[in-house]
Amino acid sequence: MKHQEGYLKSNRATNIYYQYWLPENEIKAVLLVVHGLAEHSGRYMNLVNHFVPAGYAVYGIDHIGHGKSDGKRVYVERFQDFTKTLKTYFDCVRDWQPQKPIFLVGHSMGGLIGASYLLEHQKDLSGAILSGPGVKLPDHLSQITIWAGKILSVLMPTAGVAPLNYEGISRDPKVVAAYANDPLVYTGKITARLAAELMKAIVHLADHAGKIRLPILISQGGCDTIVDPDGAQLLYNLVGSADKAIKIYDPLYHEIFNEPEHETVLKDVQLWIESRCA
C-alpha cells in the first residue's frame, strides 16, 4: 500500500494533519475516517490493514487540538470547527478521488462529528458507518451540572473538567498499553469548552437526526463503558434513513475496531459497504 501525509488549514487557519493509504490496484471506494476524542487518525491501522488490501482507499484527519494537528489539546472554540475542517478535507479527497463512492467512518466523538456533518453534507456521501457514537448525554448529568459546565466554558474555557477513562477502550491489554504510551494520545482531562460544545452538539443532533437519510450502519460494543451503548439504539431510532442497520457486539468494549474480534467487525462493515457499492 502507499502512504501519504500532509497538512491543510482549518477554518481558523490552524495547521491540520492528514494522512491516507492507497491500494496498489484500482480503488473500489473511499473510507473517510473521523477519529474520537483525545486520539488521532494513526490509531486505525486495523481498519487500514483490512480495507486497503481489499481495494479501498482510507483517508484520515487529526482534529484540531489532536494528534499531529495544531491547537490546544482537546480544546475547540466551537464544535463547528470540527465539521468545517472535515468539509475542507472532504473537498480535497473528492478532488483526489473523483467519481469514487465515499463512506464516512466516525468513531466515538468522531461519530458525533460525523453524524453532525451529515446534517449538512450527506448528499456528497454514499453512506456512513458510526462506531460507538458519542451521541447521548450521560444519565448522571443533572441540569445543574450542565449549566455549571456552560458557565465554566465561558469563564475558564481551557480548564480541565473530566478525566478520560481509557481503560475501557478494549479488552486487549496491549491495545490499552499502546494507547497509554502513545505520545500523540492525550490522557489528561477534557477542557470545559470542548465538554460544553459536545453537549450542545448532542442536543442539536437529537433534535435534527431525522434529516439524515443516507444509508447508515451503526455499530456498538455491548459492554462499552466510555459511551452509553443505548446511544447507538437512540440514534438508530432517530435517523430518517430508509436504509439503516444497527449491530451490537456483545461483549465488546468501546473500540470495536481494536478488540480481539475486530476482524469479524471489519468484515461486517466491508459486506455492508460492498452491498451499497453494488
Image (spheres, rainbow, N blue to C red):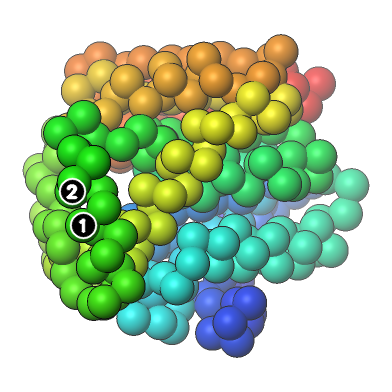
Q: Is residue 276 left or right of residue 236?
A: right
The disc placed on residue 148 is 1
Q: Which residue is mark 2?
A: 145
What x and y, as percent, mark residue 105?
Answer: 55, 42
Mark 2: give few (<14), some (14-19) or many (20+) Cα within 10 Å.
Answer: few
The residue lying at 65 percent from left, 56 percent from top is 22
In terms of secondary structure, where does tag 2 sit? Answer: helix
Q: CA distance from mark 1 to mark 2?
A: 5 Å
What x and y, as percent, mark residue 81?
Answer: 55, 67
The part of the image, by quadrant, that contains residue 157 is bottom left
What x and y, as percent, mark residue 178?
Answer: 18, 57
Q: Nearer the viewer, residue 62 or 164?
A: 164
In terms of secondary structure, where does tag 1 sit? Answer: helix
The part of the image, by quadrant, that contains residue 158 is bottom left
Instruction: Answer yes or no: is residue 123 visible.
Output: yes
Q: Nearer the viewer, residue 230 or 271?
A: 230
